[in-house]
Image (tube, rainbow, N blue to C red):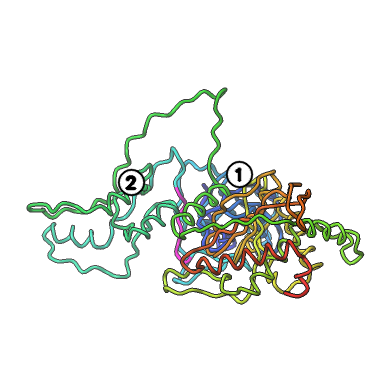
Amino acid sequence: MTTMTEASVREFKMPDVGEGLTEAEILKWYVQPGDTVTDGQVVCEVETAKAAVELPIPYDGVVRELHFPEGTTVDVGTAIIAVDVTGGTAAAAPAPVAQPEAPKEEPKAAGSGRQPVLVGYGVAASSTKRRPRKGAEAPRQEAPAAAQALQSELNGHGPAVVDPAVERPRPLAKPPVRKLAKDLGVDLATVTPTGPDGIITREDVHAAAAPQAPAAAPEPQVVPAAAPAAAPAPVATYDTARETRVPVKGVRKATAAAMVGSAFTAPHVTEFVTVDVTRTMKLVEELKEDKEFAGLRVNPLLLISKALLVAIKRNPDINASWDEANQEIVQKHYVNLGIAAATPRGLIVPNIKDAHTKTLPQLAQALGELVSTARDGKTGPAAMQGGTVTITNVGVFGVDTGTPILNPGESAILAVGAIKLQPWVHKGKVKPRQVTTLALSFDHRLVDGELGSKVLADVAAILEQPKRLITWA
């Protein structure tokens, strides 16, 4: 990779386009070396664990080099494109797209402050190095300052003074492994990596967390500069005609990690109720003919969403979250209503901000925009942040109901089953009625059975008698 040393060349770094994301995959480049770019021009599209995002360049100039090809996963804070901002001509010899064979260490900027990379996006708080690709030689890691001090003493130079300003290299570990280490109280800097290229694995963290038997007479040992990489495992083979293997990354990877974390962190309780929604279905048909809803998306989900918002207004304590770090229950005075959406990129949960303030037509418009954006794959990270309660409509797949898992950071999720014509006792007689089953899962740390039952009962009562939307709203 060509190293840019000219003062006229600006390196644009991969920004953190979400909350705490550590990496993103470059999906598509819209420019090539030699192209002229202007401030605000979109130069590439990247996929994070939450969404596909287009990145605009924050200055004018001529593209000198693309540091990574399409399909490469790049750490946040790593330079991805070099631009000559002095007005260099497009006729200059363009540098080819770099291939990820040789890892490059990102030069440090002067000073210790955060470096602005793009208006509206954050950057990683610490310097981030590019992760070595498979097949590349792992970069040598510098020994921690404590190890250098010990080495000096063993060499006969006497006790060495450890400089606290010496920066310790950031251990290589994937986000799920970092979370595991945090949960187990393990400092990753003390873990000996055994994974490829010096990456710390889950097994390494468990081994570090396990109690060690005391040694009889330990001798001083020098901490190695880098643990030797484990011998590569034999390449597994499989019948491609009978199996297809899909890499777990992007939205699917993030969803899996979030669901596992939620399932094993929040004690889930799920309650069910079967309700006659015949009157709600009639109201849906009436609203479709109402000129106030002309051009808007009107369906049962609209009235179910409104029913849940009214139930939350009547039982506000359910709209909360659990703050483990501070041991506090955070009660929210706003409702960002999440709607689970199945997209070609996986399950995402965008939310309608301040849904509690919207009229029924405004809610219909917001739902329509949310669904259309999700289907087009254009949902941005901001739309999936800050949700407080979620609805998942499994009924569209013909499923009666389910036991939904909480969206991380939320206290409740409502699953809506298929609406079917069933025999039902109505006014003392068995008649065919439109019936559905609702399931409400909630975090039992902050929502007890009484509160959860009241919310579910209120939603059911409104759907059975939708005129309550007027009296209860």
Dominant SS type (magenta):
loop
Query: Left or right: 292 with respect to 30?
Result: right
Query: Left or right: 287 with respect to 276?
Result: right
Residue 341 appears in the rendering: no
Residue wearing tag 1: 70
Q: Position of residue 142 (x, y in %)?
A: 31, 55
Q: Position of residue 390 (x, y in %)?
A: 62, 61
Question: Which segment did they paint magenta?
Answer: 125-131
- Which residue type does callout 2 highlight? Glu
Residue 244 appears in the rendering: yes
Mark seen at residue 203: 2
Whether residue 123 appears in magenta in the rendering, the answer is no
Q: Residue at x 17, y 60 (%)?
A: 152
Q: Looking at this view, is 368 or 40 the one in front?
A: 368
Q: Is residue 328 above or below residue 290?
A: below
Q: Earlier in the sequence, mark 2 or mark 1?
A: 1
Q: Residue at x 75, y 72 (%)?
A: 358
Residue neighbourhood size for the residue with mark 1, other residues' Cα within 10 Å, grouped as few (<14), some (14–19), many (≥20): some
